Amino acid sequence: MLDDFLSGGAAGVEEAVRKAAAVEILPRFRQLAAHEIVQKNGPHDLVTVADRLAEEHLTASLTTLLPGSVVVGEEAVHADPRGLDALADGDPVWIVDPVDGTRQFVHGDPGFATLVCLAHRGELLASWTYAPALDLMAVARRGGGAELNGVALRSGSPEPGAELRVAISHYDFTTDEQKRVLGALDTEGVAVRPCGSAGLEYLHVAQGSLDGLAFSWENPWDHAAGLLLVAEAGGVSGTVAGEPFRVTGGNALPFSAARDEPTLRHILGLLASAG
């Protein structure tokens, strides 16, 4: 059933993602009222009415496209963490972040995205990374490559001897210990900056405009779509323990994604040295 869907029915997913953004997200961009913005776990962790309604919209449309599938969405899991259990079950799972980069969205910055990834028993099968305010749609299919607005993506490799450009977990979302470990990347030959929308940072790696990422949290909706996008563009990823990242959780952290294997090994080596 999944093979048939991926070979034909998946075309409807892009339309569903675009429609959810057109109906629930873009009309509220730079139009949010104060009561439509709520703190979740602190002043930097925000949720808006657009996040909730877009996730509801996608939940209805995606499960209609693929009967028998379920949705693991950021907002639904925040309300009931037991929703994460579906990632390890036998049903196909849509992993959804309705507005990745909510802080950017709230502040009127176009650098936010809607992330959707189809997975089965922890295996990533297809992903959609859509930045509606920037008119960017990146699509990846396992074994089928990655595209941005219909043009093939290749991550390539950094120029020999060039300073590595690496985005890391934003300081506002890290503990002192996580800051200490990520601080190992602040060394000669590496230019570090805090990340924005995780989904768009993965796109930058897949494009080759960013050399690597290092994250200290494992929420599947932040990473699933981007990890597949990078992999299908020729990039790689792994945890500080030298293991593949698992969307089902329980990873050794931090983990990294990079344009190529030598860059990944260098980033993970620096992180491991601080462990």
Image: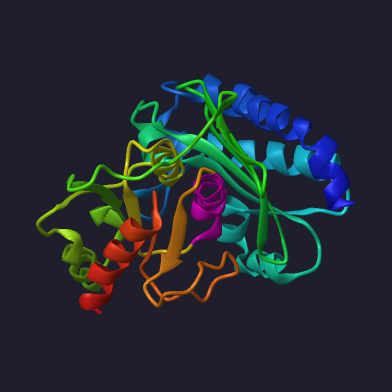
Residue shown at 53% from the left, 51% from the top: 231
Residue found at the far front of this picture: 160
Residue shown at 66% from the left, 49% from the top: 142
Residue found at the far left of this picture: 188
Q: Main secondary structure of the magenta part?
A: helix
| Lateral position of residue 106 relative to residue 193, left or right | right
**What is the x, y in percent for residue 132?**
52, 25
Residue shown at 43% from the left, 45% from the top: 202
Image height of 157 relative to 243, above or below:
above
**What is the x, y in percent for residue 164?**
22, 48
Image height of 71 relative to 15, above or below:
below
Nearest the eye: 34 or 50: 50
Q: Does 162 appear in magenta?
A: no
> How is the protein colored in the picture?
rainbow
Nearest the eye: 57 or 116: 116
On the image, which quarter does residue 33 sit in? top left
| Lateral position of residue 172 relative to residue 148, left or right | left
Look at the image and give the residue range highlighted in magenta: 219-232
Residue shown at 29% from the left, 44% from the top: 158
On the image, which quarter does residue 168 sit in? bottom left
**What is the x, y in percent for residue 153?**
50, 34
Q: Quadrant of the C terminus?
A: bottom left
Image height of 199 relative to 16, above or below:
below
**What is the x, y in percent for residue 133?**
47, 22
Nearest the eye: 146 or 63: 146
* Residue 49 in view here: no
